[in-house]
Each structure stands twice: as structure tokens, then as C-alpha cells.
Image: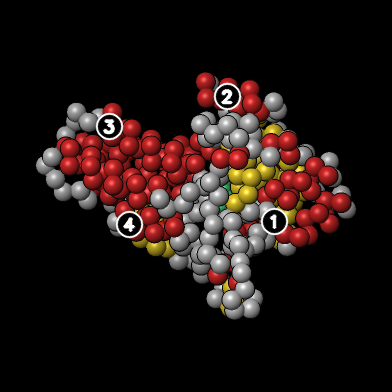
Amino acid sequence: MRPLDYKDGVLKLIDQTRLPTEYVTVDCRTFEDAARAIRDMIVRGAPAIGVTAAYGIAIGALGIVTESKDDFFRQLDVICNVMRNTRPTAVNLFWAVDRVLKKALDNKNKSIQDIKDIIVMEAYRMDTEDVEVNKSIGRNGNELIKPGDTILTHCNAGALATCDYGTALGVIRAAHDSGKNINVFADETRPYLQGARLTSWELQQDGIPVTLICDNMAGHFMKAGKVNCVIVGADRIALNGDTANKIGTYSVAVLAKENNIPFYVAAPVSTIDFDMKTGDGIPIEERKSEEVTHIKGIRIAPEGVSVLNPAFDVTPSRYVTAIITEKGVVYPPFDTNIRKLKQT
Ligand code: MRU
């Protein structure tokens, strides 16, 4: 299942705001369309927004009309900045923008048309690479799963959040496909309900046994011995292993430690921010209050109530058992072991 598909200057996205009740797609024909799709969460999930930004830049670059190389790069810079300003937490977005821009600059001696083609090719390469990376994460993570395990996950780190296959759900897919008879508990993930709307739908599509629970039920099931491990995705991992992920992940990690349950983070190396020493510096997106006061447009809280809506939290690395990447499973001490990923 792919949430995005690029062809001839048009990026088609599954509108994830409408799932699971409606399956509709949205066409992005301008870079502004792609930026809006990220901001409005038509597409979401760290790797998927990174690749959407890359395609958005490609679409923007194709639309630049100029004979001057300086002007081309000036306009390209503007487009890149629009992409950078869509969402602040997932580092994959910034990684993707920087990678596309660097590719263009490395080829600045070529013709403008050639540079445009190179940008499109780079976005396409990132798209296909992401799928391979997720399959490697799946294979590496599968080693940690025992037959019959019940795995709890939070938010949606699945095919819908990537270019296909998923990270946390990639491990779950690999375990399922290898016949381990696993079960999944999907946290509903208030307020945006990625678990209820997206993870349970995505797993159902693939016939993977999934049970939807409310966020506040996780501790109950852990204490009852019904959860063997937790696997979540990540939006940004600091050098010391502190991990930003969907709001509520921190609570799940604390509960897992209290109940002696392994807590795994599954993420590509592109989710590691090698410039960020600890999680304290990770910017946390604050989203609009209506996401908390309303469900599907229906008010559930009194008018005028004060609301806070941070979209992510940071789990301190002491709660993380291991980080599953495409390059292998990384264990503590994260300070030294994460740095090694940059060199390999
Ligand atoms: O706000 P979202 O839906 O973009 O948040 C998504 C998450 O927090 C995911 O767990 C994370 O991006 C990893 S996706 C492979």
C-alpha cells in the first residue's frame, strides 16, 4: 500500500484525513499543493512527508520558467523554504529537502533542464530507497519477535506513514509474513486517532490480527501480561537515543519499563538528527485546539475551554530497549552506538 505516487509532474496522495471511512486521493500539481498536503496532514508520518517534500520540490522546479541559473537557484531556495516550514518535528523532512537541494547544487554546471530532471530523479530515488530501507528494518526487527507475541504500537508507523511497508508496522509485517502468528494492539492515539483510523485499517487490509484499544488501556493490558513488546516509529532521534514520536509515546514507554516489557523504536537512519545531542532541543509541533475539542467536526468539550495540543513528545533514551534501523539493531550505550551508524 503506497500513500503517494508521482507521475509526469503530478503527485497523487491518499487523503489520510478521510480514512478509513472514505478512500479518496488528492492530486498535487504545484509545490504549494504538496506543502499544503503536509501541513494539513493529507500525508503524514516522517518518511512520507520527507519524500512528499522531495516530490514537491521537483514539481516546483519543473514549474520554474527562467533562462538564468542564478534565478533558478534563487526560486528553488524559496520552494525549499516553503517545504521546510510545513511541519517542525520530523527531521526526515529537513533531511529530504537538504538532500534534493545538495543534489541540484552538485550539478549546477549542467543545463537548467538537466538539473530539473536530476531533481525529479533524486525524489524518485528517495521514494524507492525508502521502501527497501523499511524492508531491511522489518527483517532486522523480526529477529526480536517470538512466535505468538502480542505487539503494542502507537500512532501509525506503517505503509501509510512511509513510501510502503512501514517501520514499526514493517517489523510487524515481517513477523506476520514469516508465520509467527503475532497479534497487534493498536493504541487509538488521541487526538488525531492515527491508531484507530489508520493503523487498524492498514493492518486489517493485510489480514494481520489487530485489536484496537484506547490509549489509557495500555497499562491495564501490560500489567495483565497481555503485551510482549512495544514497537513504535520515530520523528526524530537525538544522538543520545532520546526519541520524539507521536504524543503519548512517552507514557507507553514508561508503562513498558514498569512492566518489564521491551520498548523498541523502529526508524530509518534518516530519522536520526546527528546534530542534536539530546531530545531537549527537538522542536515540538503544537497543533490547533479543534483537534482536541472536536471529533469529526462534532464538539466534545465546552466552548472557550483552554486547550493544549502538542503533537509529539520525547521519550528519554533510558526507556528505549533498542532502536531498529536498516543498518541493524542499536542497543545502549546509544551515545556511542548511534554515532557509528553515520560512519557505516
Ligand atoms: O503527526 P503524524 O501522524 O505525522 O505523526 C506520525 C508519527 O508520530 C509516526 O510514529 C512517525 O512519524 C514515524 S512514521 C514511520
Q: CA distance from mark 4 to mark 1?
A: 33 Å
Confirm whether residue 132 shows in the render: no
SS label for mark 2: helix
Task: Name which of mark 4 and mark 1 comes first in the sequence.
Answer: 4
Instruction: Give the residue number, with chain letter if any, for mark 1.
Output: 186
Describe residue 90's horizontal placement relative to residue 211 as left or right.
Answer: left
Q: Is there CB contact under 8 Å for labels 2 and 4?
A: no
Q: Earlier in the sequence, mark 1 or mark 2?
A: 1
Decide: few, some or many residues near mark 3? Use Cα within 10 Å; few <14, some 14-19, many ≥20: few
Residue depth check, mark 4 versus mark 1: number of the one nearer the observer: 4
Q: Quadrant of residue 34?
A: bottom left
190 left or right of 117 in image: right
Residue at 33% over, 32% down? 102
Residue 181 on image: x %, y %: 75, 47
Label 2 crowd (10 A; few <14 / some 14-19 / many >=20): some
| Pointer 1 residue Cβ closer than 8 Å to ligand 1 | no
The residues bearing labels 1 and 2 have C-alpha atoms spaced at a distance of: 32 Å
Separation of residues labelled 1 and 3 (CA atoms)? 43 Å
Q: Position of residue 240 (x, y in %)?
A: 63, 31
CA–CA distance in space, label 4 to label 3: 22 Å
Disc 4 target residue: 32
SS of the residue under disc 3: helix
Residue 249 seen in this snapshot: yes
Residue with the mark numbered 2: 339
* Residue located 64% across and 34% down the image: 241
| Count of marks overlaid on the render | 4
